[in-house]
Amino acid sequence: MFYGEHEHSIDRKGRLIIPAKFREVFKENYVERFFVTRGLDTCLFVFAEDEWRKQESRFKSLSFTSSEARQFNRIYFSGACEVNCDRQGRILVPDYLKDFAQIKRDVVIVGVSNRMEIWGKENWQEFYKKTKDSFEQVAEKVFGRVESGPTPQGLAG
């Protein structure tokens, strides 16, 4: 649904333009409302309303007797706010979320399949620099060793 990196700036009023490519996805899927919240790795997560509801349901099912679950839910949901795009395709990013993500002016909006992430430009560059060289090793850990495909014998048989 959301893919790619897009550089933008937050204006003096705290508004951020959503990339045109993402706005097209919104129109195609009749998305009008979004939820922005504190994300992981010092970025903000942005979900379309239907995806937000899925995430909300998933996190609500965490045991409230677990201190880690309570802590996560408090930070995650207390940071959440509902936003709508204006006619120019901008959303208003609250100051407390900009502070959390260390966003000053320049941002990178990253499409991560079911969500967008908003990063302070410097934080994104630092994250990317630290992780790009370990991409293959991380993939192997996450997905396990991937076989190269069927053997020629398997194709013939």
Image (spheres, helix red, strand yellow):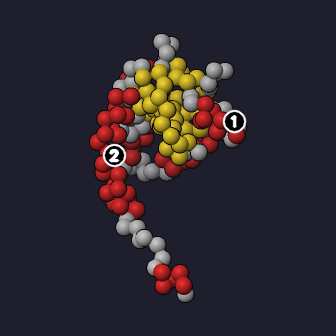
Q: Against 4, is 79 above or below?
A: above
| Residue 107 falls in image quadrant | top left
Q: Secondary structure at mark 1?
A: helix
With respect to residue 64, does 108 lie above or below? above
Residue 99 can be seen, yes or no: yes
Q: Position of residue 2 (x, y in %)?
A: 55, 42
Q: Residue at x 64, y 39 (%)?
A: 25
On the question of residue 74 being in view, the answer is no
Q: What residue does disc 1 label?
A: 27
Residue type for callout 1: Lys
Residue in the picture at 39% in, 28% down:
120
Q: Quadrant of the N terminus?
A: top right
Point out the residue furthest to the bottom here: 157
Of label 2 and label 1, which has the lower sequence position? 1
**Residue pictured at 48% horizontal, 36% vertical:** 5
Q: Return the mark for residue 132.
A: 2
Name the amino acid, label 2.
Lys
Mark in the foreground, 2 or 1: 2
Residue 95 % position (x, y): 43, 20
CB under 8 Å between callouts 2 and 1? no
Q: Position of residue 45 (x, y in %)?
A: 47, 36
